[in-house]
Amino acid sequence: MSAFSKELKSFVVVAHSGSIRAAAEKLNISAPALSRQIKMLEESYGKKLLIRSSEGVVLSAEGAELRAAATEWLAADVTLSKHFHRDQKKADLRLRLGTMASLVDTWIPSVIERLEESFNNVELDLVIGSTAEIISRAEAHELDVVVAFNLPKLTSMVVADTKEYHLGVVSAPGYGPSGEGPISLKEALDFPLCLPSSALSMHTRLIGEILSVRVSPDVHVTSNSVPAILHFLRRGRGVGFLTWPDVAHDVDAGRLTFRPLAVRRLTETLSTAICRGNDLAAATPVVMRAIQTTLTDLGE
């Protein structure tokens, strides 16, 4: 929990993004909702903080002053929170966590940092695999928590949180469709494709949408591995269709670009589930809060 409002945090994201739309995608809210937050902040300070144009937004003099101050405030808030929590640590934690390879870089480092604020020592037993492989380990009572796409309802686990992510068009910088914002499927199909194979849950729905637009798409690579698809995309061997959690780490590092598809029917559901018979005991709420906060911070 932070002492600062979501409006202030959102303003900092907008200030660094230079675009309401781009910031809204990162924060996983609509552009109009984000604009309302900024308006509330401007009304609170009684100053115009952003200057809008067809190319995005730039900071006013007051906006630049607020960004500098807010960046310092938020950093100090994190430092102070860590200091206070350090004195409250009471136990060690061993967490048996199952997730997918494409999600490791995106959120695992951040969730470990959060857990280390609450426990003396964190031992992470990380199991990587497909949804089916992770379910198998959970049913064998080898996991405490699962974070994976498209988990079915099972008696071996209780789904604590779900979030839908829309597929977007992913490509290397300088390759693929130009522009920003939502993109039509037809535009993306003008380029060679790197696609999931039938082993991945998104395959059938994605291929159905593609074939409804183009009977013979130019497929360069198909794979049952999202990391393998990412490998080819980083090297400019085609464009792909993945969710924001799959690519957030690469986009932040400048290795890939992500534009949401205008076709909003294509979604993947990311679930966080607690396995029955887990070993977390009293640590359960702290662990789940750390995971859910980390995933929320990903945005879209």
Image: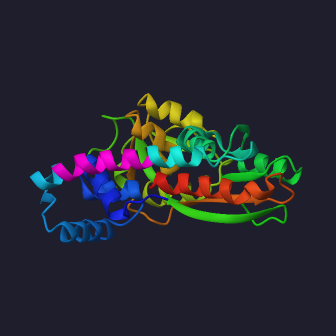
At 32% from the left and 55% from the top, the residue drawn is 23
Percent from the top left, x then y, of residue 248? 46, 44
Percent from the top left, x then y, of residue 16? 27, 46
Provide the residue span drawn in magenta: 65-78
Which residue occupies the foreground of this view, 247 or 179?
Answer: 247
**Please, is residue 116 above or below residue 236 in the view?**
below
Say if the magenta span includes residue 71.
Answer: yes
Look at the magenta stretch and give its main secondary structure. helix
The image quadrant of residue 14 is bottom left
- Residue 247 is left or right of residue 18, and the answer is right
Which residue occupies the foreground of this view, 49 or 54?
Answer: 49
Which residue is farthest top?
Answer: 235
- Residue 100 is left or right of residue 11, and the answer is right
Instruction: Answer yes or no: is residue 51 visible.
Output: yes
Percent from the top left, x then y, of residue 222? 58, 39
> Which quarter of the rendering shows the C terminus?
bottom left
Which residue occupies the foreground of this view, 134 or 173?
Answer: 134
Which residue occupies the foreground of this view, 234 or 45?
Answer: 45
Say if the magenta span includes residue 75.
Answer: yes
Instruction: Answer yes or no: is residue 185 visible.
Output: no
At 54% from the left and 48% from the top, the residue drawn is 84
